[in-house]
Amino acid sequence: MDVRALLMGLTFAFIWSSAFTAARIVVTAVPPLYALSGRFLLAGVCGILLALSLGQTARLTRSQWISVIVFGVCQNALYLGLNFVGMQTVEASLAAIVGSTMPLLVALFGWLILGERPRPLGIAGLIAGMVGVALIMAGRISGGVDPWGLFLLCLGALALTAATLAVRGTSGSGNLLMVVGLQMLVGTAVLLPIALVTEPFHLDGSPRVLAAFLYMVFVPGLFATWLWFRLVLRIGAVKAATFHFLNPFFGVAVAALLLGEPVHGADLVGVLIIMAGILAVQLSKQIRTRPVLAESQEA
């Protein structure tokens, strides 16, 4: 892994984690599904216009269209929709921790459902990660966390896990911004009708909320998604996913610095255990792929 890939991975992890803090600012002032629909609409239109200016087209491959639909529904509408509603009553730091368990959930359900047994290092990482999650959850539940909001966050993480398992190996190398933009519009198409029926509309135009909204649109929404695809193309999905182990730390740190959310001792210990677990799971995948790569090179 070269220095540029390292910087790309660190930047992506930080931006991805900071999105929870920005979302928390927005959803405490604006109806969450309206906010998310607006975010996807603005980001989608900007992404498509930028893609067209770069010569990209909507003539996508079959695998790219699968990615557009599956991630547009499961990631943008379900995962983020459930997260935004849940974060009305749940702190950004806890939302970041729950969201960060996705690599652990992918490994677990890949094993239970698809029969993809992890290596011993991966199994140890799964166990460690679950222990870390249980430690944090026990402290938060005893501290009075909203159970309904927490349930929505967990349900969202499962939706993202399902999407990840469903579209593995279907990504293409072309029209990246167009794919991202179309995924955003799918999210709007799903969420806006629900918002119109279930949420009263009101708008908070304060500079703090507006800045957080625009940050969500252009930084995590467009730039980080594009950066992730570029990182995958540069070093591969397995190595790129290793950077997810930093998400719990960055998520808790940003929420503490910008929102003043308290960080308890159990949170710190749990975050470190989860980070170690995610890293172990991702490293075990790299170990597993090396013999395959060696055989293909010999052939």
Image (cartoon, rainbow, N blue to C red):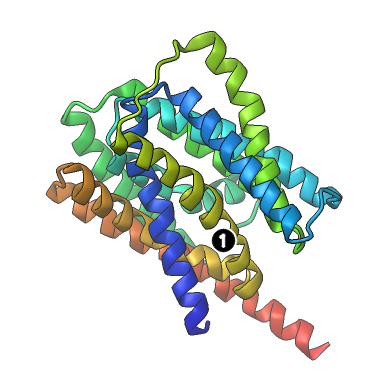
Give the left or right position of residue 73, taking residue 239 as reference. right
Q: Is residue 118 above or below residue 131?
A: below
Residue 25 appears at what percent x and percent y? Answer: 31, 35
Q: Is residue 238 above or below residue 271?
A: below
Residue at x 66% of width, y 69% of height: 233
Q: Quadrant of residue 163?
A: top right
Residue type marked 1: Trp
Residue 81 appears at what percent x and percent y? Answer: 50, 29
Please indicate, yes or no, whether residue 41 appears anywhere in the rendered image: yes
Give the residue furthest to the bottom. Answer: 298
Identify residue for label 1. 228
**In the rendered image, which quarter contains the C terminus?**
bottom right
Q: Is residue 195 above or below residue 276?
A: above
Give the left or right position of residue 111, taking residue 174 as reference. left
Depth check: give the residue in front, 56 or 69.
56
Residue at x 38% of width, y 59% of height: 14
Residue 38 appears at what percent x and percent y? Answer: 53, 30
Residue at x 30% of width, y 40% of height: 92
Q: Quadrant of residue 112?
A: top right
Depth check: give the residue in front, 138 or 25.
25
Residue 175 appears at what percent x and percent y? Answer: 75, 57
Q: Residues within 10 Å of mark 1 (few under 14, many from 20)?
A: many
Depth check: give the residue in front, 154 or 196.
196
Q: How many marks?
A: 1
Give the left or right position of residue 278, taking residue 57 as reference. left
Q: Quadrant of residue 261?
A: top left
Under circle 1, the secondary element is helix
